[in-house]
Image: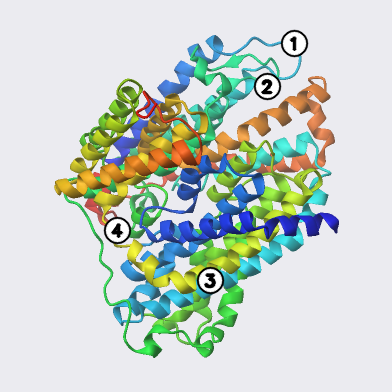
Amino acid sequence: MEMILAGLLDAISPVSLMYVFIGVAIGVLIGAIPGINGPMAIALFIPITYYMTPLTAIGFLVGLNKGAFFGGAVSAVLLRTPGTPEAAATSWDGYPLTQQGKGEKALRMALYSSVAGDFISTVVLILIAAPLAAVALFMGPAEIFALISLALTVIAGIGTTSICRGLIAAGLGLLAGMIGTEPVTALPRLTFDVYQLGGGLSLVPVAIGLLAFSEILIQMERFTGKGSGAHAANVFSSKREDRLLSRKEFFANTRTLLRGSAIGIGVGAMPGLGAPVASFMSYDQAMKRSKHKEEFGQGRLEGIAASESANSSVVASSLIPLFVLGIPGNLAAAMLMGAFMIFGMQPGPLMFKENAQLMYGIYGSLLIASLFLAVIGRFGLRAFCKAVEIPAMILYPIVIFTCIMGSYLGRSDMFDVGVMLTFGVIGYFMRKFDFSYVAFLIGFILVPEWERTLQQVVIISENNPTMFFERPVAVGLMVLTFFVIGKTFWGNIKAGRDCREPKTKSTPQAENN
Amino acid sequence: MTRIQRETIANLVIVGFCLVMLMWAIPTYTPKYPGYGASPRLVPNVAVGIMMVMAGLSLVRLLLARFAGKTLPPAEHHYPEEAQSTGFTQIGRINLRNLALFMIPSILLVVGIEDLGYVPTAFLFLMVLQYVIGNRKWIQMTVLSIVVVAVMYIIMRYGFGVPVPGPQLFE
């Protein structure tokens, strides 16, 4: 109880409150800009957190992520250009409302749905993470090794249309994560005699390169030589009833909000699915259960409530596998895991024992971030709407320069900038060829723990591989892993055999890609 | 170039990379087995093995499709506009010219900053970048470059106490 109180007191300290507030505000602003999302924002801002305490840093990054999730809805509603992938479903009903002059009403619905989904999900996280972590403490190295193996195969499906390419990307991530000092011999491994690689590749330049720089390289292909400036029109009607959201309108969607939150929590708690899945699933359910199905896609508030409550509830629930098992459920959680590791902490069940006060402080910051999101969104709505109109020719040079200086900031070494640029190009090709950079990053982050547990298993068992068979949970998890890989093999062979003549079904554009 | 050709080339590059790693890089740049625990080569070999098997599998599949005179299954053929613009990947043509337009100034910045110093190099970099993107308003370009360089300098130098790279202007 003392720990809980101390943690919560830390969370409401003025410095902590200030950073959470700044995080949420920057998150909304960044999320509103098409092409910049939460994980990308976390990657860009991690270097700044070197100069914070662990609680303020995690509070700041969590606030950033929460803000970005709502911010994605701003451009989705105003421009039909979702700022983040998970806001795509929000645009289906949000943009028609904007065209009717009810953009502000749509944004208010998105805001309150986001806050509701996020708050419910945070409460669920607080209630179940610690008890589940207590159970997870009974897992030994064999189980953790098997669990990470399973997570890597499941996560390989994120961000690509082919799990095969996902596994290749995960393999490349594992390989990149092994560069540096080998844990048992303490000798350099795969450093190619480059002394800067002796300490391994830093997460920050790798993440900035893959997430931010490569994205900007692709975005710029659209704007080079042309310039760009999006213009949101017809957002704020002069009629009060078109701008404001009445209580009746909000509470008419209570069921949808609760259903969306439940879907978001379920999807977020399972590694590998992510917010876009939750958002589409919730929208689909809302439409199927609605009495006004025909109005979906034409500006129905229920559609916005379904999408936003589900995608925002993923933010907190994706921390459940991270806090309970030490496995990130999605990219944002992976980036937060990286932030924990920068502070010398390994997320997982032991966190509740070793850093209990910090964990309760983080819980407090999560709740405060929800509150700040409501306040900042409510009073800053009009200002954030302006963010979508920042011209690309002004924004992107600033983002590129921030990528460069952010990579330098960590170790004050231009070598890291070179690493960032290299991974920017790798990320560019990965995106163009549909290789999942999400799987790459998660592989990169998880490999030290994966190798550590493998070494523990081998050393404890004195090189006896049958030791695995004495651990039924580990065996079950490994069987599942091989099942997923086997299914991939079979699926690929079958797909090759079952290819259909595309002339009637494919588009020439797709063929030429 | 069709998607089958693109994917075949990509998978061949991956297989080639894996062979180089397995036959040269891992044996040369990995410590010897110390006699306890797992070999330091085990995990790198597993990672490369996964990549090679998956790339090989993809090649088999592409060959099967090619010999049958068919193309990829419809599910992988259709990338709805929405998925392209909002998803994680943006499958499409490689624009090497565009890539070079942004990478060359970035590389020159990394190389030049150590000799010329942060202020002139960063200023020039931002000017070039804005020009490449299509900005032709010279006053706006100059003001933006000065403001960004100055703000970043102040944040780094006085906010975080980190010296900016290269020769210092005010020392």
Residue under label 4, please give it.
A390
- Indicate the amino acid at tag 4: Ile
Q: Do the residues labelled 1 and 4 touch (CB within 8 Å)?
A: no
Name which of mark 2 and mark 3 comes first in the sequence.
2
**Disc 3: which chain?**
A
> Considering only vertical position in the picture, is A78 above or below A354?
below
Q: Which mark is residue A30?
A: none
Quadrant of res A230: bottom left
Residues at marks 4 and 3, CA–CA distance in whole angstroms:
23 Å
Q: Which mark is residue A375?
A: 3
**Disc 4: which chain?**
A
Residue under label 2, please give it.
A183
Image position, residue B74 (x, y; %): 36, 52
Identify which residue, A481 or A80, lies in the foreground. Answer: A80
Q: Do the residues labelled 1 and 2 touch (CB within 8 Å)?
A: no
Q: Is mark 4 on a helix, strand or loop?
A: loop
The C terminus of chain A, quarter of image: top left
Residues at marks 2 and 3, CA–CA distance in whole angstroms:
47 Å
Identify which residue, A65 or A80, lies in the foreground. Answer: A65
Image position, residue A227 (x, y; %): 19, 52
Q: Which of marks 1 and 3 is in front?
A: 3
Q: Is mark 3 on a helix, strand or loop?
A: helix
Q: Quick check: do tags 4 and 2 share a chain?
A: yes
Image position, residue A15 (x, y; %): 62, 54
Residues at marks 4 and 2, CA–CA distance in whole angstroms:
47 Å
Instruction: Categorize mark 1 by other alpha carbons within 10 Å: few (<14), some (14-19), many (20+).
Output: few
